Amino acid sequence: MTDQNPGRMLDTGFFRGWLTAAAAAVEREADRLTELDSAIGDADHGSNMQRGFRAVMTVLEKEQPAGPGAVLILAGRQLISTVGGASGPLYGTLLRRTGKALGDATEVTSAQLTEALRTGVAAVAQLGGAKAGDKTMLDALEPAVEALGTSFAAAAEAADQGALATVPLQARKGRASYLGERSIGHQDPGATSSALLIGALAQTAGATE
Amino acid sequence: MLINVPETVVADALRGMASAHPGLSVDVDNRVVVRGDAPVAGKVGLVSGGGSGHEPLHGGFVGPGMLSAACPGEVFTSPVPDQMVRAAAAVDSGAGVLFIVKNYTGDVLNFDMAAELAEDEGVQIAKVLVNDDVAVTDSLYTAGRRGTGATLFVEKLAGAAAEEGQPLERVEAIGRRVNESARSFGVALTAVSTPAKGSPTFDLPEGELELGIGIHGEPGRERRAMMTSHEIADFAVNAVLEDLRPSSPVIALVNGMGGTPLLELYGFNAEVQRVLSERGVPVARTLVGNYVTSLDMAGCSVTLCQVDEELLRLWDAPVETAALRWGR
């Protein structure tokens, strides 16, 4: 897929499109996320993400933020205000810090998005105190950011692989960690929803090519 | 279950709480319970919160001598930062606000975000993390010890210090000291049923019990054939004492998980006191009842809090809340 060069310009519409695609993916996959969460958590990841991304769609429609950074900051704040649990602050921080790093430009390059997303993912790691291999969102997000330097499609592939690779891991963060070795053998719901978010990004990049 | 529909259980309970306790100011839409006379001039505010299903924690501990406000989330789901920010604004007199946070990933993250937002609005925030559950032994490889029964002690003793007019740093220091001085261990005789699911969330056959549980139906340290009250007290108190090793008297909280009658809890307390006496641990005060619960779960927990003269004075200080009241 020829979806990227480092100088490709991404505008406000691109970022709205990304979040719209992410919201659609969450709707489509909500039951699967909840099912994964019932194995090693408290069976509400799908419904929590659904509530959050529905609220994001509503607020983006209502407030019409101008600029890529403003879109992500508004979406992040909305997730923080509506999701609760651990996912709300973590996803909210991912989008808010990525948006802050993009600043108030009306267009950004894909290279700038890669760097901003790196900042956002680092903020998630800091907030959650987790690192790669702890069976969390980071297991999908960190490889995705590395691959994003190559292409959007490579990032989506890396995120999917990262989510799959959480199956044999033992959880060391979040409620799944209380299960100890019993968390082994299940795919992490947070890594799975993170892969959906990166997949939506690649889809949007392809669709706007 | 005695409910209408699962979606409204939290809001319904808040409306009922408002009617029963006119001394509280209850914002049902924004899910904040505030003591009616807040903000109290010159007084540090205390805000706590967490998932619903642990009543009377935290709303039942709002009032003079204890919490200034509480933020209830969905059942077993942490509240969102907007609730804590709103609560902090409502109770801040300018003396600052202490957040009391149970150690669960969701609670910690949402309170952290709320602290940042409240500080942006000019409210000085300090935080105390409660992590007293000795059943979580592998803290390096988990989210760490859970916050359970010690939350009551932190809220009571820090609340009394704030009521005396002590400044934020002192109230925070007392909260930390109380958490470091308190340990808990819990036992489940039945699984818990959430309103959304309507049936037990895990399978615990009759004739078995789960030792070392949390307050969300998380799995325990081990499952065994049913034990007597005598045997459970030996196991629970010894688990706490292995970790706490008190060098001064303790306050004992013999807590019901929501589905165990007081008749049984008092009987269990007699056994707890017996073990403490055998182990040579003097008991300064005892509280028996359902305070930090897990919906309809049958079972109990023991929390011991080591106290010096100052902490004992703060425990005895007047308190006037829905669930704890004395000395006024």
Image (cartoon, rainbow, N blue to C red):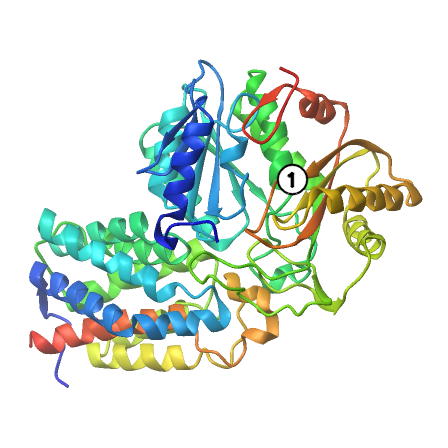
Vertical placement of residue A159 versus B64, above or below: below
Q: Are there few (<14), some (14-19), or many (20+) residues within 10 Å of tag 1?
A: many
Q: Check disc 1 and give the amino acid type.
A: Asn
Q: At x 66% / y 70%, what residue is drawn?
A: B205
Taking the image as shown, residue A60 lies to the left or right of residue B250, namely left
User: Which residue, as the protein is rendered here, is positioned at the far bottom?
Assistant: A1
Q: Position of residue B151 (x, y in %)?
A: 60, 40
Tell me if I can see residue A151 in this picture. no
Output the chain of dot 1.
B
Q: Which residue is mark 1?
A: B179
Q: Which image quarter: residue A25?
A: bottom left
Q: Is residue B157 visible?
A: yes
The residue nearer to you, when weighing B37 against B245, is B37
Q: Nearer the viewer, residue A71 or A32?
A: A32
Closer to the camera in the image, A93 or B33: B33
- B166 is higher (above) or lower (below) than B56: above
Of the 4 image quadrants, the one containing the C terminus of chain B is top right
**Is residue A143 positioned above or below B241 on the image?**
below
**Left or right for B109, reference A110:** right
Q: Position of residue B21 (x, y in %)?
A: 47, 26
- Residue at 81% in and 48% down: B241
Q: Secondary structure at mark 1?
A: helix
Q: Position of residue A13 (x, y in %)?
A: 7, 62
Q: Residue at x 80, y 49 (%)?
A: B237
Q: How many marks?
A: 1
Please name the residue shown 69% across and 67% down the image: B206
